[in-house]
Amino acid sequence: MSPRKHKKTSEMLLEILEKRSKKGIDFARKTVLTEIIKCEKLRGAFEYYTSNWKNFSHPGLFSIACEAVGGNPDKVVEVQAVIAMIAAALDIHDDIIDKSDIKYGRPTVFGKFGQDMALILGNVFFVSGFTLLGKSIEKLPEEKVKEIFETLKRSLLELGSAHALESNLKGKTNVAPEEYMQILKMKAASVEADMRIGAIVGEGTNSEIEVLTKYGRILGILATLREEFIDVFEIEELSHRMHNECLPIPVLYAIQDKNSKERIQKLLAKKQVTSKDADELLDIVFEARNVRKLKKMMRDLAEESIHLISKMRVKELKVLLKNFAASTLEDL
């Protein structure tokens, strides 16, 4: 069953993230709007993006991490807004890199306004975000300020490296899945940073901060791998990735199976992938031994993350974090 067709738990958790991220996103929207440039087209691109702001995960997870260590997310809305703005910048720039015209059934800023406006808007979010960050944490102890900036620095450098490495794989069908897996693990740095910064501003203990940091990395890996599986189900996305990105990692693993390789290559060689072709590809991929191993690895990671947070102090948040880890395996 496609994970797009039955996501009751996932949908519930998305609603929680949306609700938790609202204050931070609203603050981010107002902050950028007061600073937005006089260019009418750029303002239009900003209003278009913020009118359908879909990136709830990062500010939402930040809120959960803050509260999980006993903090009050309402007292750090400005920092949450920073997380939302940096996530928006990365989101917009990712669409440029991947040449993504459509996302969630709607044109992206890149698809509607072009590369130049998308690039500039992403930069506006970055500049506004880091400017606000400096103001919002200036009263924190010096060591916390330093750790927050170091966390963001490490995260952004790792993400940049991941995208640089991934760009070398575009259009290739013979990519070693282990090579691509390493890139996907690097991309999890963003979720790790959300959780770590949330725990820091929530005044968690050193032990709690490290636990949520490790949990964030694992959750980021699992969420990224889930998206890789979902892209196998989506014909348009799969076709886009064949021409503009690297093939989804389940396909790369399936190709390593001698019994699957020839059949997959034959399907991928077609100029246009039909629904029938996609169904056949799904069957081949999910029957592959290496893909079954990949799914087991994901289950093991989920169990590891659940064990990590077993001693968190806020019971309700501990249950919520367990559900997030478990939801990445839903319908797979």
Image: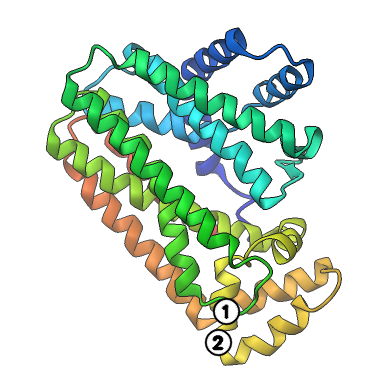
Whole-percent x and y of residue 73?
Answer: 34, 18
For numbered disc 1, what is the local secondary structure?
Answer: helix
Whole-percent x and y of residue 93?
Answer: 61, 40
**Amino acid tagged 2:** Asp
In the rendered image of this protein, does residue 189 appear above or below residue 296?
Answer: above
Most extreme residue toward the bottom, as rendered?
A: 258
Residue underneath mark 2 = 257
Quarter of the image for residue 208 reads: top left
Whole-percent x and y of residue 78?
Answer: 40, 15
Q: Residue at x 57, y 79 (%)?
A: 254
Left or right of 106 in this view: 154: left
Give the class, few, some or many, for how many residues have Cα within 10 Å of label 1's Cα (few <14, many ≥20).
many
Q: Are marks 2 and 1 in contact (CB under 8 Å)?
A: yes
In the rendered image of this protein, does residue 81 appear above or below residue 215?
Answer: above
Color theme of the render: rainbow
The numbered disc on residue 254 is 1
Q: Residue at x 32, y 12 (%)?
A: 75
Quarter of the image for residue 296 reads: bottom left
User: Is residue 328 among the parts visible in the rendering?
Assistant: no
Left or right of 11 in this view: 59: left
* 141 or 247, nearer to the observer: 141
Of the 4 image quadrants, the one containing the N terminus is bottom right
Left or right of 321 in this view: 275: right
Whole-percent x and y of residue 91?
Answer: 58, 39
Left or right of 261 in this view: 205: left
In three-dimensional space, the C-alpha distance between marks 2 and 1, rounded to whole angstroms, equals 5 Å
Q: Residue at x 55, y 38 (%)?
A: 90
For numbered disc 2, what is the local secondary structure?
Answer: loop
Label count reads 2
**Amino acid tagged 1:** Ala
Q: Residue at x 62, y 65 (%)?
A: 246
